[in-house]
Amino acid sequence: MKTICCLGDSLTEGDYGIFGKSGIANVQPEGYPYFLEQTTGCKVRNFGKSGYNATTYLNHYRVGHVDLSGADTVIVMLGTNGGLDPVNETEGNRDFRELLDLCRRDAPAANIYLCTPPHVTEDPAWSNCGYAPKVEKAVAFVRKIGQEMGFPVIETALCPEFTAENEKIYQPADGLHFGKAGYEILAKFIANAIM
């Protein structure tokens, strides 16, 4: 059985958000890695950490909280929490590159994919409005770094179901985190790209 390791922030860990709240994790087992396992039949290991950006995730990785041994596929989805910039060099950019270098070193036989961060709300009525400018920069950066470093990019930012019109269906708590239906769609979208 193939093994997939998923690295990322709350959207990987499986945070469902809390209606009207921001910054309070509501992690459930049924995140996209759970549905990815159901969809692909592979063993999927979830290394997502809510609130993390490339810098905090790199530190998390360095101290041994991520184990890529035996991985056939590694999926990295970071950027929703900021720190990445397609134009100006940032600490986050450098740490993202270093994280990818470590993934290559620790899983040399694995296929490593980068995901652009998916849609987030621009509607001020949602409690997690305000992430869109960070996500826009991160999407452009991930596309650029994928090309520079030779990693395939999964365009979750372009997933057709994730739109402003569908936020109440797929991101019902806060306009950023998915609910069950959203994580199922995300998993299927990623599965189609890697299988």
Image: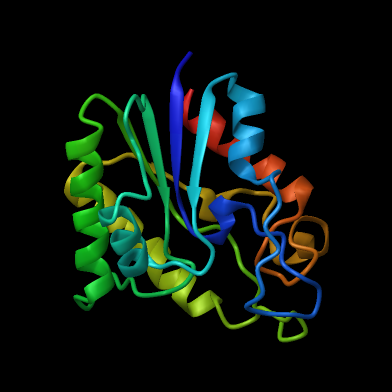
- Residue at x 22%, y 78% (from the top left corner): 88
Q: Residue 181: image x %, image y %?
A: 78, 46
Whether residue 152 is situated above or below residue 20 in the rendered picture:
above
Whether residue 181 is situated above or below residue 190 in the rendered picture:
below
- Residue at x 45%, y 70% (from the top left corner): 136
In the rendered picture of this protein, how many numbered marks are placed on residues?
A: 0
For residue 19, what is the image quadrant? bottom right
- Residue at x 54%, y 75% (from the top left corner): 132
Whether residue 71 is situated above or below residue 156 in the rendered picture:
above
Q: Is residue 109 left or right of 152 when viewed as pictured?
A: left
For residue 172, what is the image quadrant? bottom right
- Residue at x 45%, y 18% (from the top left corner): 2
Q: Residue 78: image x %, image y %?
A: 42, 59
Q: Is residue 1 left or right of 121 when viewed as pictured?
A: left
Q: Residue 171: image x %, image y %?
A: 74, 61
Spot the residue most to the top: 1
For residue 72, what is the image quadrant? top left
Q: Residue 186: image x %, image y %?
A: 62, 44
- Compare residues 108 and 162 and report the one nearer the observer: 108
Q: Is residue 28 left or right of 113 when viewed as pictured?
A: right
Spot the residue most to the bottom: 124
Q: Tell me, what colour scheme is on the image? A: rainbow
